[in-house]
């Protein structure tokens, strides 16, 4: 069982958390030139201005990468990067073991990307990402991705994503971040919207008074599904309208 839109709009303290890529913005071969749904951003900012409404963007991008792609900076919206491992109010502090693990996975990802046009390795503070969205040789790309998923390096967790494989040296996931945010902000209901496999960790920590929203196709632990980023804009716009009306009526 999960909350309805009307129940969410009228809950005493609402927390709204969304992914960025594939949720607020479309997917592009140029990671820093993605089509952002401005209706979604406007709805999030409108809700952030309301009382007892906490709004966050929880992205797999590192914070600087999100700023470059969107212009979004921490303010009335909470922004967490690297799946929650990176926060604007906390310095990045890698351990020696994490530095060693990152060096090892970087070497392996560089080896796999070598010689395949369009396949490249992105460096994030706690992650390395083997990207294949720009690849022209799809057979070679898929083989590299398969090999990447089989890598076994101490201190590194490897997960698949959309046209990419991500390696992490932190145990912070979107689920861990959401749990911590719930403990910190004490909302009476939480909405989390995401489209990728890494968002499933977030869906799984939500309870009966919450709502998990999957964007697009694929197996999911979410409560409901919307078609695409335009549908996310519709959902957030309606939630913002109902939430605003709820306070106006009091």
Image: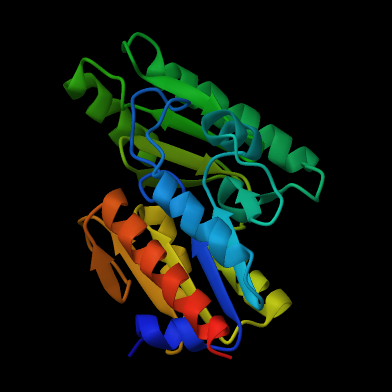
Q: Nearer the viewer, residue 13 or 101?
A: 13
Q: If the image is split into quadrants, where does the C terminus sit?
A: bottom right
114 left or right of 46?
left
Q: Quadrant of residue 144?
A: top left
Q: How many marks?
A: 0
Question: Residue 142 placed where, x, y %?
Answer: 24, 29
Does residue 240 sit above or below 5 in this rendering? above
Looking at the image, which residue is at 39% across and 18% down?
Answer: 113
Q: Nearer the viewer, residue 15 or 207?
A: 15
Could you tell me if residue 173 is visible in this image? no
Looking at the image, which residue is at 41% across and 39% down?
Answer: 36
Q: Quadrant of residue 234?
A: bottom left
Question: Residue 146 placed where, x, y %?
Answer: 29, 35
Question: Residue 37 placed where, x, y %?
Answer: 39, 44
Q: Nearer the viewer, residue 174 or 99?
A: 174
Looking at the image, which residue is at 49% across and 53% down?
Answer: 42
Looking at the image, which residue is at 36% across and 19% down?
Answer: 119
Question: Residue 38 placed where, x, y %?
Answer: 43, 45
């Amino acid at each position: 069982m999960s909350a309805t839109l009307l129940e969410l709009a009228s809950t005493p303290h609402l927390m709204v958390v969304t992914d960025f890529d594939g949720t607020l913005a479309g997917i592009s071969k140029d990671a820093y030139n993605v089509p952002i749904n401005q209706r979604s951003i406007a709805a999030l900012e409108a809700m952030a201005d309301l009382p007892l409404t906490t709004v966050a963007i929880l992205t797999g991008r590192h914070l600087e990468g999100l700023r470059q792609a969107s212009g979004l900076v921490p303010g009335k919206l909470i922004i967490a990067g690297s799946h929650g491992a990176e926060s604007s109010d906390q310095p990045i502090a890698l351990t020696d073991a994490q530095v060693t693990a990152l060096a090892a996975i970087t070497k392996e990802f560089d080896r796999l990307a070598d010689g395949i046009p369009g396949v490249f390795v992105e460096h994030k503070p706690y992650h390395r990402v083997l990207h294949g969205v720009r690849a022209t040789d799809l057979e070679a790309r898929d083989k590299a991705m398969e090999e990447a998923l089989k890598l076994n390096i101490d201190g590194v967790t490897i997960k698949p994503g959309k046209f990419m494989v991500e390696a992490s040296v932190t145990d912070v996931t979107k689920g861990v971040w959401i749990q911590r945010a719930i403990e910190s902000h004490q909302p009476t209901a939480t909405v989390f919207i995401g489209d990728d496999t890494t968002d499933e960790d977030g869906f799984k920590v939500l309870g009966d008074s919450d709502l998990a929203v999957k964007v697009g196709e694929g197996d999911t632990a979410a409560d409901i599904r919307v078609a695409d980023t335009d549908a996310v804009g519709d959902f957030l716009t309606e939630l913002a309208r109902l939430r605003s009306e709820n306070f106006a009526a009091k």
